[in-house]
C-alpha cells in the first residue's frame, strides 16, 4: 500500500512540474506539503510524536518511488526522516521530542543536518565550528557548507566542537532554530543536479544556544553523527535505487518504441543486453537496501550493511543512468527525455552522506578487522 501510494503520487503529480523545477531550481514547496499529508516526512516515528509509525522497509519502498520521478524531493524526504527524525527519536530528550520532533515528523516544519564544513567533509572529526560552554548556554561560531534544506528548514541539527583537546570526543550535537540571532545563509548553490533541493552555506556568529538543546551527554556529538549517518545512508541508497529505476523505466519504454534498422531497439541484442545488465544491478541494489532496512528494523548493526547499500546503489545509479542516456542516443542528451537529469542526480549520490570512497573505508575496515 505504501509503495502504491508513493508511486501513484509520484507518477501522477510529482512528474508534472519536475522539468521546470530542475530548470529553474524551484524548491518543491507544494510537494513537501503533500508528502506531509501522506505521512512521508516522519515515516518511522511513533504517532505519539507526530510520525506514521511505519518501518524502514516501508521507507525504502517510498523513497524509491519518489526518487524515480524527482530525487530532489527524495533528498528532502530522506534528510527529514533519517538525519533529523531518526536522530531526535533515538537520542533526543522527552522535552526535545515534544518541542521539535512532533512538528518535524508531522511535516509542519522540516529540518536540516549541519555537519560538513569548508575543511571537514569526509574527514568529519575535524570540526572547526565551535560551541563554547558559557555556563548556562553555548556560544556557537563557524561555517557549515553544502547544507541541504538550509533555507527551507526551520530547525537545524548542528555538529560543533566544544572541547578541542578531546578531538572527536569533545564534539556535541545541538538543536538550533534557524531564526536564532547570529545565523546567516550564503547564496543558493547553483548545482549540477538535485537542483530544486535548496543548498547553502550557513554562518554562525555568536549564536546563543540554550543548554537543554544539546543532544545527549557532553561529547556525544560525533557518535551521534555517525549513528545518524549510517541510518541516513539507507535513505540515500534508496534514493539512488530510485534514480536507477527511473532511468531503467524510461530506457525500456524508449527501446520498445524507437525503431532502428527496421526493428525496435529492444530487438537489438546490444540494447537488450544493456537492459539486462541494468536490471541485475538494480535488483542487487534493491536487495542491499532492503537488507539494511531489515537489519535496522530488527535492531541489528547496520554500519556495514548501510555502507554497502549506499556505495553500491550510488555507483550503479551512475552506471545505469549513463547507459539509459546511451540507449536514448541524441534524445538522451536533451532535457525533455529526463534521463540526462537522472544522470546528473545520480552523481550526487556518490558524493553526499559519505562519498563512495568513505563507504569503502567503512566496508574494508570491517572486512579486514572483522
Ligand atoms: N557508530 C558509532 N560510533 C562510531 C561509528 C558508528 N557507525 N563510526 C565511528 N564511530 C566512533 C568510533 O568508535 C570512534 O570512537 P572512539 O574513538 O571513542 O572509539 C570515533 O567514532 C571515531 O571513529 P574513527 O576512528 O573510525 O574515525 P575516522 O576519523 O577514521 O572517520 C569516518 C570515520 C567513517 C570516515 C567518518 O569520518 C565519516 O563517516 N565521514 C563521512 C562523513 C559524512 O558522511 N559526511 C556527509 C555529510 S552529511 C550530508 O551529506 C547530508 C546531506 O546533505 C544529504
Image (cartoon, rainbow, N blue to C red):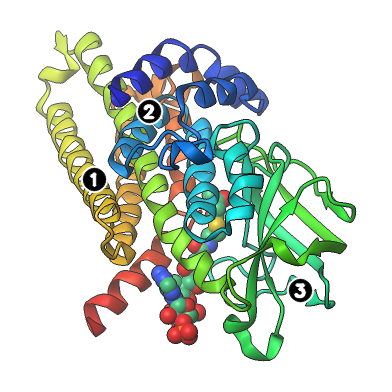
Q: Residue at x 77, y 62 (%)?
A: 143
Instruction: Give me the C-alpha separation between circle 2 and circle 1.
Output: 17 Å
| 290 or 361: nearer the viewer | 290
Q: According to the image, label 2 marks what residue?
A: 68
Q: Is residue 118 depicted above or below 328 in this figure?
A: below
Q: Is mark 1 within 8 Å of ligand 1?
A: no
Neighbour tally class for label 2: few under 14, some 14-19, many 20 plus, Cα within 10 Å: many
Asked if the residues shown at circle 2 and circle 1 are in contact, with their CB atoms under 8 angstroms apart, the answer is no
Q: Where is residue 268 in the image (x, y as percent from the top left)?
A: 12, 22
Q: What element carries label 1?
A: helix
Q: What element carries label 3?
A: strand
Residue placed under numbered mark 1 in the picture: 290
Residue 39: image location, x then y, percent: 46, 28
Label 2 element class? helix
User: Quick one: 264 or 65, which is closer to the camera?
Assistant: 65
Q: In the image, 200: left or right of 322?
A: right
Number of the label disc, if any, that sits on residue 130? 3
Quadrant containing the C terminus in the rendered view: bottom left
Amino acid at each position: 500500500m505504501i509503495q502504491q501510494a508513493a508511486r501513484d503520487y509520484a507518477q501522477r503529480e510529482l512528474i508534472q512540474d519536475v522539468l521546470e523545477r530542475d530548470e529553474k531550481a524551484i524548491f518543491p514547496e507544494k510537494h513537501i506539503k503533500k508528502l506531509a499529508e501522506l505521512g512521508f516526512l516522519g515515516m518511522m516515528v511513533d504517532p505519539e510524536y507526530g510520525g506514521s509509525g511505519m518501518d524502514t522497509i516501508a521507507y525504502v519502498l517510498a523513497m524509491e518511488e519518489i526518487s524515480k520521478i524527482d530525487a530532489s524531493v527524495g533528498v528532502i524526504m530522506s534528510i527529514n526522516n533519517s538525519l533529523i527524525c531518526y536522530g531526535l527519536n533515538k537520542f533526543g530528550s522527552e522535552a526535545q521530542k515534544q518541542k521539535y520532533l512532533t512538528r518535524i515528523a508531522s511535516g509542519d516544519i522540516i529540518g536540516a543536518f549541519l555537519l560538513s564544513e569548508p575543511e571537514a567533509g569526509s574527514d568529519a572529526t575535524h570540526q572547526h565550528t565551535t560551541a563554547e560552554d558559557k555556563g548556562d548556554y553555548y556560544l556557537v561560531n563557524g561555517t557549515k557548507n553544502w547544507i541541504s534544506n538550509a533555507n527551507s528548514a526551520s530547525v537545524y541539527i548542528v555538529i560543533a566542537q566544544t572541547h578541542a583537546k578531546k578531538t572527536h570526543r569533545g564534539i556535541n550535537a545541538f538543536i538550533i532554530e534557524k531564526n536564532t540571532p547570529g545565523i546567516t545563509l550564503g547564496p543558493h548553490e547553483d548545482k549540477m543536479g538535485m537542483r530544486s533541493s535548496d543548498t547553502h552555506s550557513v554562518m554562525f556568529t555568536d549564536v546563543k544556544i540554550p543548554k537543554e538543546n544539546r543532544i545527549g551527554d557532553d561529547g556525544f556529538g560525533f557518535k551521534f553523527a555517525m549513528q545518524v549517518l549510517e541510518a541516513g545512508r539507507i535513505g540515500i541508497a534508496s534514493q539512488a535505487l530510485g534514480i536507477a529505476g527511473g532511468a531503467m523505466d524510461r530506457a525500456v519504454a524508449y527501446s520498445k518504441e524507437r525503431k532502428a534498422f527496421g526493428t525496435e531497439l529492444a530487438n537489438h541484442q546490444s540494447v537488450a543486453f544493456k537492459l539486462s545488465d541494468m536490471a541485475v544491478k538494480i535488483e542487487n541494489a534493491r536487495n542491499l537496501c532492503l537488507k539494511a532496512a531489515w537489519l535496522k528494523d530488527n535492531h541489528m548493526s547496520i554500519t556495514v550493511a548501510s555502507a554497502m547499500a549506499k556505495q553500491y546503489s550510488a555507483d550503479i545509479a551512475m552506471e545505469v543512468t549513463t547507459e539509459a542516456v546511451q540507449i536514448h542516443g541524441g534524445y538522451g542528451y536533451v532535457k525533455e527525455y529526463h534521463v540526462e537529469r537522472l544522470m546528473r542526480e545520480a552523481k550526487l549520490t556518490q558524493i553526499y552522506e559519505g562519498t563512495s570512497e568513505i563507504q569503502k573505508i567503512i566496508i574494508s575496515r570491517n572486512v579486514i578487522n572483522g
